[in-house]
Image (cartoon, rainbow, N blue to C red):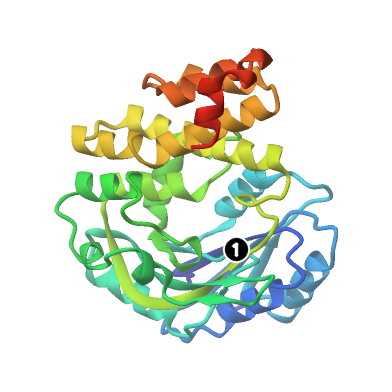
Amino acid sequence: MRQNKVPVLVSVKMLTYNHESFIKKAIEGVLKQKTSFHFNLVIGEDCSTDKTKEIVLQYAEKYPDKIKVVTSKSNVGITKNSQRTHEACEGKYMAYCEGDDWWIDDHKLEKQVKLLEENPEYGMVHTDAHFRNTQTGELKTNYLKSNFNTNHYQSFISFQDQYEKLLTKKTEVITATVIARKDLVDKARKENPLSFSNRFVAKDAPTWLEISRLSKIHFLPEATAIRNELPESASRSNNKERFYDYIFSLVDSKIHYINKYPISEKAYKVIFNGYLSKWATNILRFSYRHNNFERAQKLKAIYPENFTIKQQVFYWASKYPFIHKNWLFNYFRKT
């Protein structure tokens, strides 16, 4: 007689595509977790062209009660792969680890679940991580501690405050370290489907922004994962067109959230005088270098602020090549 299935408390969502060099460590990092509860690993394998799928299926055959593989006969792309893998997750909580990252703390899930169980006001718990350059092997230890004042992670003044900290990039969330309440993730995806559509390349950042509006986020100041920095990924590429498509998507996403939820005037100024203005300038500079006025127009159509003089020069230079010889343009080109 078949025994009753043990309820899954945590489902670990792992998306993978052409991660042959990393997938074994990613899977092993999950399987090594020492917990007082049952968890499973749900792998969304999107028909890799290397040996990733073969490796994933071998592990699934070896650990049938622990690993569930979601795949298909042909590649479906990151949006559909993410959605179908999400739907296959059955736990009360969802943890995340992409196929090119891995966990280094065998008690990661136990620590984070304990915090969520004891603090119902927490919707999400994340930690620090080490960043590893896959080409040089260089390791940036405790990335968040090194780049931010982590004291303000511990106690947020309000939900609005933590949302603005994420939006102004005064804090950051590393996907491979996250565990969240699945009902909140479901609510975020349901109430704002646009953020999880093909319009935006980044799928995780919108989730953290939505959860920050619904609950508190807690930070553990210890490294539990390795985040691998690859030369080619969704956020990195040697192909300049692809890279600037990604930057444009980030700008589009941030503006979407600025419009969706009211933010303070101070936060608005920080965003538009800081990284968003820098990204916009880089997009316009790239547009002029490739005489791509269509890209420049596309940015202008969504950008809620007036372009700076420098940005206007790049904007019009992308349409009128003769401006390239103008002394004013040459001045801004060098700045």
Frontmost residue, 326 versus 100: 326
Residue 70 image offset from top left, x and y in percent:
69, 57
* Placement of the N terminus among the 4 image quadrants: bottom right
Which element type, helix, strand or loop, lies under badge 1? Answer: loop
Residue 102 image offset from top left, x and y in percent:
58, 74
> Residue drawn 21% across and 62% down?
152
> Residue drawn 41% across and 59% down?
173
Task: State left or right for residue 199 relative to residue 322.
Answer: left
Given the image, on which type of amino acid does mark 1 rest? Glu
Frontmost residue, 169 versus 20: 169
Furthest toward the front, the residue is 327
Furthest toward the left, the residue is 157
Task: State left or right for residue 172 relative to residue 216.
Answer: right
| Mark 1, other Cα within 10 Å: few <14 / some 14–19 / many ≥20 | many
Residue 1 in sight: no
Frontmost residue, 130 versus 239: 239
Compared with 22, 300 (above or below) is above
Task: State left or right for residue 312 relative to residue 215.
Answer: right
Q: Which quadrant of the figure has residue 292?
A: top right
Q: Which residue is mark 1?
A: 98
> Residue drawn 46% across and 77% down?
141
Compared with 204, 154 (above or below) is below
Compared with 5, 267 (above or below) is above
Frontmost residue, 134 versus 214: 134
Residue 278 image offset from top left, x and y in percent:
45, 38
Residue 33 image offset from top left, x and y in percent:
51, 83
